[in-house]
Structures are given as C-alpha cells and as structure tokens.
Image (tube, coloured by chain):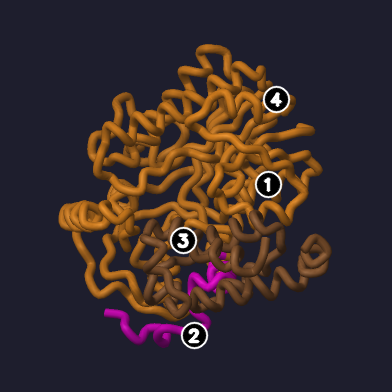
C-alpha cells in the first residue's frame, strides 16, 4: 500500500464513520469543528486505521490531531517508523 | 475458571472486566464486531473473535471451549422513541446469546443487567434483588428493555442455562469509550450541560463492578447481585464534580414532567442524524425513578467492597482528560457559575 492509497483510506474512513459524502472531507477540514467528529468517532477512526494498516498508533497522542491533513501526516509518520522499511522491501 | 469469553469486551465495562479476569490469571477471549474499537484490547493478551449478538451461530462458535460467558454487551437504546422495536431488539439479542450458550454447552453465564430493571422497594428499606416488577415498566423505554432482557435470561434458565445476574448502578471509571453514565461528568466539566433534573442516582466504580462479575462466576446458578455502589442526588453530584474539576452548573433545572418532555423532543430532533443528546430520556427516567439500593448481598456473598465515590470520579476524570473528552484547560473556576 503506497502513501496515496493510505491518504485516500484515511479520508474515506472519516467519511464512512461520519456518514457523509467523501467529497466533503477536505485536507484542511478540522475534525471536530468542521466535521463534527466526537471523541468516540476519533477512537473508531484511529483504531480501524491501526488495525487495517497494521501499525501501532499512540492513541493519546493521536487524540490531539486537528485536521484531516494532520491525521494523514500522523499515519505516515507512524507507518514510516514501524512499517517503512518492510514496505520499501516489497516495493 | 480457566477460560472466559467476554461478549462486549471492547466496551466500557467489558475492558475493565477483561483486566480483572487477566489479573486473576484467566485466559480471555473477546467478541468484536467489524467496527469495534479494538485498539485498546489489542494491547492486552486476549484472543479476539468476530461475533455479533444478531448472529447466533457466530456466538456459539465464540463460546466453544470456555468455562464462563460474560454477557456484558446488553443492548442500550440510544433513543427512547420506538419502545416496541427497542424491546424486540434487546430481547432478541439476549435470546440469541442464551441459545448460543445452551448450544455450546457453556457451564455458566454471567449476565449484566441494570438497577434500572428494579422496581420500587417497599417503604422503609432500600431496593434490592427482590424488587423485580411483576409487569414491564410502562413509563420508560430503557427500564422496559432492561426488564424484558432479564426475563429472557430467566426463560433460558428454565431451558437449562446456568446463569448469574449482576445488577450494577451507573458505572464510572476509565475506558468509558462511549461516554455513558460519565457523560454528566464530561458535560459538566466542559460547561455544556444545558439542563438537569434532580433525583437519586446510584454510581459505582466500574472496577468494583468488574470484580463483582468475576466473583459472580463462582456463585450458585440463579443468584442475583445488586452492585449499586454509592447513592447520591444529582444536584450534590454536580456540585462535587464542579468543586473537584471545575465546570459549570447546568443553567436550567427541570421538574420530572418537563424533563421527560424536553428529553423526548431533543431525541426526536437528534434521531435523523443519529446525534447524541446532552441529557437522554433514559437518564431522565433513571434519575426520576431513582431510589437507594442495597448491595448487601454482593458484599456478603461475593466479598465485594466499594471504592470511595471521589476516587471513582478521579479515575474517570483522569481517563477523559487523557483521551481529550475533557480539554486540558478548566472551563470555569469552581463555584463560579453555580446558581
């Protein structure tokens, strides 16, 4: 799975959890203020991402994520730290 | 008990129950649904299996080879709008789980009920396990569902299921991912509770309830245990929360009738988008019909003790802060907005 696919998955999962059209989820959208995501939905998002991507996300740290772009960046940092080497080997 | 299955182990009570079982050296299997928040469980040494209360065969598969099933996944209607549908769903799910336990030949099942399923006690004593209403409660969807679910467990016992029922008050403490009873704490500290209704609530540290479940697994089949914890009025509870963590007293206090009407109207407005409401009707019902309960049998027979209420609130507050349900900054100084 490449970085673009992971970014798309973050966006589509946010839309799925919030039951909104994916086109309304933009990189600059703020999860809480703009999209109305609550704490439980944030946990759902991060839990599902960590399971699907098989990476360990520090949940407390992740709860500070503000925007969709931040969520993507957080996933990428965690991916690079834990899976980057293995993924590069399969590229 | 060597191997246990926790149905509902990804939830609030479930996670605490998993920890209590692991502490006792029990091997734990937990059911999950596709969208369950599993991040916390995956950090614990448990086996995760897919099963759903709507899918009896999946439950029977999950129950294979365990000594005890903990049914801590009771249906919790988000809104009190469609009474018949809520009762049908709640009873169907309990029936599925009990049938699966019978089919799998599970030696014992511990069922989690609610003090909301109790009826009024005769005057002069607190309510306890004996106070089972003869008829389904008419004034509350939540209480009706919980009453009907208990009757389903009894029907399964008549078919041979060996079950023990734990009847907890409102649980507070860590891992409250759905922010259930603790919603009043979060709402008050965030200064977002728009109104409240006064009455009696029973609050109990979720760790005490988890320990009660573990011990109830060794109790005689057919036993029932109220685990009510602390009896307190809502007004005094909110005052205690504000004094400890800051926040704001809700600006409006409603009498029972208007409180029910307000909660109903809020739920009807929130239902199309499946939003949560600040004060759900089921909470109003529990407060309005609240009464002191006695946990004497659980103390005597299960050797249960209760954490002080202040400690339980502190543990809950710490967890909500840690996962940002409560912002790091105080909303208002203690007492600032009290009427």
Chain letter, colour brown: A
Q: Along the line of sight, which residue is nearer the eye, B325 or B159?
A: B325
Q: Which residue is mark 1?
A: B18
- Which chain is drawn using orange? B
Image height check: is B285 above or below B307? above
For disc 2, the marked residue is B329
Q: Which residue is mark 3?
A: B182
Q: Is residue B93 left or right of residue B192?
A: right
Callout 4: residue from which chain?
B
In the image shown, does B61 or B255 lie closer to the viewer?
A: B61
Majority secondary structure of the magenta segment? loop
Among numbered discs 3 and 2, the one appearing first in the sequence: 3
Q: Which residues are magenta?
A: B316-339
Counting other residues with Cα less than 10 Å from the Cα at mark 4, is it few (<14), some (14-19), or many (20 or more)? Answer: some
Q: Residue at x 48, y 43 (%)?
A: B294
Residue B203: horizontal and vertical position, in percent?
47, 55
Mark 3 or mark 4: name the one nearer the start of the chain: 4
Please tell me which of labels 1 and 4 falls first in the chain.
Answer: 1
Mark 3, secondary structure of its residue? loop
Side of B289 relative to A56 (left or right):
left
């Amino acid at each position: 799975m490449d970085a673009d696919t992971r970014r798309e998955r973050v966006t589509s999962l946010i839309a799925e959890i919030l039951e909104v059209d994916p086109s309304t989820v933009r990189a600059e959208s703020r999860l809480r203020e703009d999209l109305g995501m609550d704490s439980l939905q944030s946990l759902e998002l991060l839990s599902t991402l960590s399971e699907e991507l098989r990476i360990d996300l520090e949940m407390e740290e992740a709860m500070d994520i503000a925007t969709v772009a931040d969520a993507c960046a957080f996933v990428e940092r965690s991916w690079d730290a834990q899976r980057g080497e293995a993924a590069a080997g399969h590229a | 008990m060597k191997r246990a299955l926790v149905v509902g182990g990804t939830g609030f009570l479930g996670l605490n129950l998993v920890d209590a079982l692991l502490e006792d050296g029990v091997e734990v299997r937990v059911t999950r649904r596709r969208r369950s928040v599993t991040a916390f469980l995956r950090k614990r040494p448990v086996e995760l299996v897919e099963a759903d209360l709507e899918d009896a065969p999946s439950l029977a598969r999950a129950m294979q080879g365990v000594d005890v099933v903990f049914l801590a996944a009771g249906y919790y209607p988000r809104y009190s709008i469609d009474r018949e549908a809520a009762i049908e769903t709640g009873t169907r799910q309990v029936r599925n789980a009990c049938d699966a336990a019978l089919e799998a030949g599970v030696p014992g099942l511990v069922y989690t009920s609610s003090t909301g399923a109790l009826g009024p006690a005769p005057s002069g004593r607190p309510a306890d396990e004996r106070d089972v209403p003869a008829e389904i409660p008419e004034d509350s969807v939540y209480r009706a569902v919980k009453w009907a679910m208990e009757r389903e467990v009894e029907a399964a016992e008549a078919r041979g299921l060996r079950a023990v029922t734990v009847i907890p008050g409102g649980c507070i403490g860590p891992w409250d991912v759905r922010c259930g009873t603790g919603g009043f704490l979060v709402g008050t500290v965030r200064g977002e509770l728009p109104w409240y209704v006064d009455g009696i609530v029973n609050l109990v540290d979720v760790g005490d309830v988890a320990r009660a479940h573990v011990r109830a697994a060794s109790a005689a089949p057919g036993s029932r245990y109220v685990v009510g914890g602390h009896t307190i009025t809502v007004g005094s509870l909110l005052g205690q929360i504000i004094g400890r963590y800051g926040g704001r007293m809700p600006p409006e206090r409603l009498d029972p009738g208007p409180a029910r009407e307000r909660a109903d109207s809020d739920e009807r407005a929130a239902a199309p988008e499946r939003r949560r409401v600040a004060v759900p009707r089921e909470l109003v019902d529990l407060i309005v019909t609240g009464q002191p309960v006695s946990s004497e049998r659980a103390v005597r027979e299960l050797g249960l003790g209760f954490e002080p209420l202040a400690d339980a609130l502190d543990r809950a507050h710490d967890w909500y802060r840690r996962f940002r349900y409560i912002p790091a900054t105080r909303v208002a100084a203690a007492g600032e907005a009290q009427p």
